[in-house]
Structure formats: structure tokens, C-alpha cells
């Protein structure tokens, strides 16, 4: 198929929080002009809901949802232009949830 998984990883951050990271290479489209689809999410495993996520799609580009469980429409733009730099930002955020 035209979809290639470039990166996929899950990491338990604490008894409450788990992070899931995925980067796909896909055919460029209007929604994903750079041909990458990313999904980086920190889940509260007790409530089974996301507490932070990063994704990328038009018209927003790379952005975070700082409180997706409360309001998915709040987005913060990330000053990055590729999925690997977005992942670095996500990894810093993961540290805030480790051992909590």
C-alpha cells in the first residue's frame, strides 16, 4: 500500500499515564500536504481519555491539543515543519507526566 509506518511506540509514563506515538508516510493530499500523518497522545489510562495530543493536518499544520478531554477545539500551533521535530516537543511533554 501507499501508507508506510515510519515510527510507532508506546511508553508507560506512570501508573496513570501512557503515551502513544505514531508517524505514517502517506500520499500527499490536501489535508496532509507534506505526506505525513502523525498521532502523539498521552492517555489517562484510569479515565481512558487523552490529556494531551499533537497532530498535523490542514488548515492548522502541526499543533497540539493541550486539553483534548475538555475542549478539542483548543489548539496551539507548533513552530515545526516535520514530524520528527514535533516528536521532540511531545517527548518533552511526556516528561511532565512521568512518575506522576
Image (cartoon, rainbow, N blue to C red):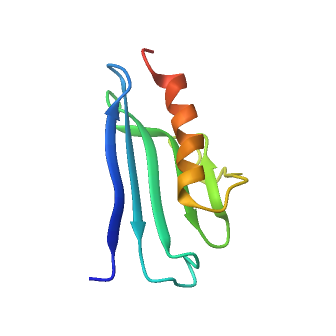
5 vs 62, left or right, is: left
Q: Quadrant of the C terminus?
A: top left
Q: Residue at x 61, y 49 (%)?
A: 64
Whether residue 70 is visible to the viewer of this picture, yes or no, is no
Whether residue 90 is visible to the viewer of this picture, yes or no, is yes
Q: Picture coordinates of residue 46 (x, y %)?
A: 32, 27
Q: Is residue 57 above or below residue 90?
A: below
Q: Residue at x 63, y 59 (%)?
A: 62
Q: Is residue 80 above or below residue 95?
A: below
Q: Residue at x 49, y 69 (%)?
A: 36
Count the marks. 0
33 vs 39, left or right, is: right
Q: Residue furthest top?
A: 99
Q: Is residue 99 above or below residue 77?
A: above
User: In this view of the protein, which residue sits in the foreground, 51 or 9?
Assistant: 9
Q: Residue at x 54, y 41 (%)?
A: 90
User: In this view of the protein, which residue sits in the foreground, 43 or 40?
Assistant: 40
Q: Is residue 99 above or below residue 87?
A: above
Q: Picture coordinates of residue 43 (x, y %)?
A: 40, 37
User: In this view of the protein, which residue sits in the foreground, 71 or 93?
Assistant: 93
Q: Quadrant of the N terminus?
A: bottom left
Q: Picture coordinates of residue 83 (x, y %)?
A: 54, 58
Q: Picture coordinates of residue 72 (x, y %)?
A: 57, 51
Amino acid at each position: 500500500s501507499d501508507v508506510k509506518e515510519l515510527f510507532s511506540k508506546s511508553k508507560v509514563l506512570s501508573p496513570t499515564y501512557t503515551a502513544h506515538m505514531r508517524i505514517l508516510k502517506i500520499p500527499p493530499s490536501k489535508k496532509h500536504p507534506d505526506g505525513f500523518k502523525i498521532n502523539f497522545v498521552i492517555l489517562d489510562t484510569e479515565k481512558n481519555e487523552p490529556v494531551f495530543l499533537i497532530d498535523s493536518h490542514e488548515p492548522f499544520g502541526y499543533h497540539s491539543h493541550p486539553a483534548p478531554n475538555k475542549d478539542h477545539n483548543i489548539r496551539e500551533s507548533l513552530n515545526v515543519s516535520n514530524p520528527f521535530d514535533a516528536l521532540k516537543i511531545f517527548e518533552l511533554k511526556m516528561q511532565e507526566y512521568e512518575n506522576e
